[in-house]
Image: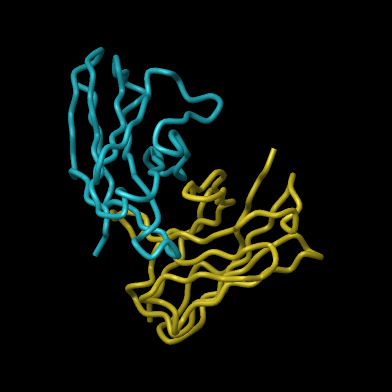
Amino acid sequence: QVHLQESGPGLLKPSETLSLTCAVSGYSINSGRYWGWIRQPPGKGLEWLGSIYYVGSTYYHPSLTSRVSISMDTSENHFSLDLRSVTAADTAVYYCARIYWVGLTYYFENWSQGTLVTVSS
Amino acid sequence: SSELTQDPAVSVASGQTVRITCQGDCLYTYSASWYRQKPGQAPILVLYADNNRPSGIPDRISGSRSGDTASLTITGAQAEDEADYHCGSRDISGKHVVFGGGTKLTVL
């Protein structure tokens, strides 16, 4: 059974870089799946941030391409999110997820428990 | 702004049937997925490829898609179905993912 667990700081100051890592157990991340990050501001809906394929190709939310990057470390079986120049608007619960993407079918199959990241001076 | 539109809130009497809808142009092309989220918890997948249930999801939850609208239907709603329901799909370009704003379902 696949399990995903995020780690990273919970409090940042404006202009800093948010860095989160998603450790995957029960599945090898280089076995042919996509992996992604989603966030949810307090009291609001879900927002997709980006996805990475096991060979390294990436897709990012159009409004975040200048600030976001996602990478993988297959030796550690984890993938990571970096979001630069954060503001209070980036305060949210951040989730990582395993993705199923074949043809026209795309969905987030497994989710992490989520971690709250607060941006405040 | 989200490219998928959901009603913010829907209510249903216990034991009755409720339909939650999700509308967007991308649904003419791409399938929808649905996620249930209870307070303080992570979302979980309840429907994928419009009408497929992962293991463990009860068969009182069903889905469909027609034109630009996807629907999640709960037949015989129970108290445990009370949650936020989010739809998701790919955007028109096919390269990005979009979510609806979520629907808060209240079971009366």
- Image colouring: by chain
Depicted B92 relative to depicted B47: above or below: below
Depicted A102 relative to depicted A1: above or below: below
Task: Judge from the rendering whether residue B50 lies leftward or rightward of residue B1; answer left or right.
Answer: right
Q: Position of residue A60 (x, y in %)?
A: 47, 71
Task: Judge from the rendering whether residue B51 lies leftward or rightward of residue A109; answer left or right.
Answer: left
Depicted A1 relative to depicted A33: above or below: above
Q: State which chain is coloured yellow.
A: A
- Residue at the location (57% across, 71% down)? A58
Residue B46 seen in the current view:
yes
Depicted B39 relative to depicted A24: above or below: above
Q: Position of residue A55 (x, y in %)?
A: 70, 67
Quick one: A18 or A63, which is closer to the camera? A63
Quick one: A93 or B96, which is closer to the camera? B96
The quarter in which the C terminus of chain A is drawn is bottom left
Q: Position of residue B25 (x, y in %)?
A: 25, 54
The quarter in which the N terminus of chain A is drawn is top right
- Residue at the location (46% across, 38% down)? B48
Question: How many numbered circles are shown?
Answer: 0
Q: Position of residue B19 (x, y in %)?
A: 23, 29
- Residue at the location (44% across, 33% down)? B46
Task: Judge from the rendering whether residue B60 lies leftward or rightward of residue A56; answer left or right.
Answer: left
Q: Quadrant of residue B94?
A: bottom left
Q: Quadrant of residue B12?
A: top left
- Residue at the location (40% across, 63% down)? A92
Q: State which chain is coloured cyan.
A: B
Residue A112 seen in the current view:
no
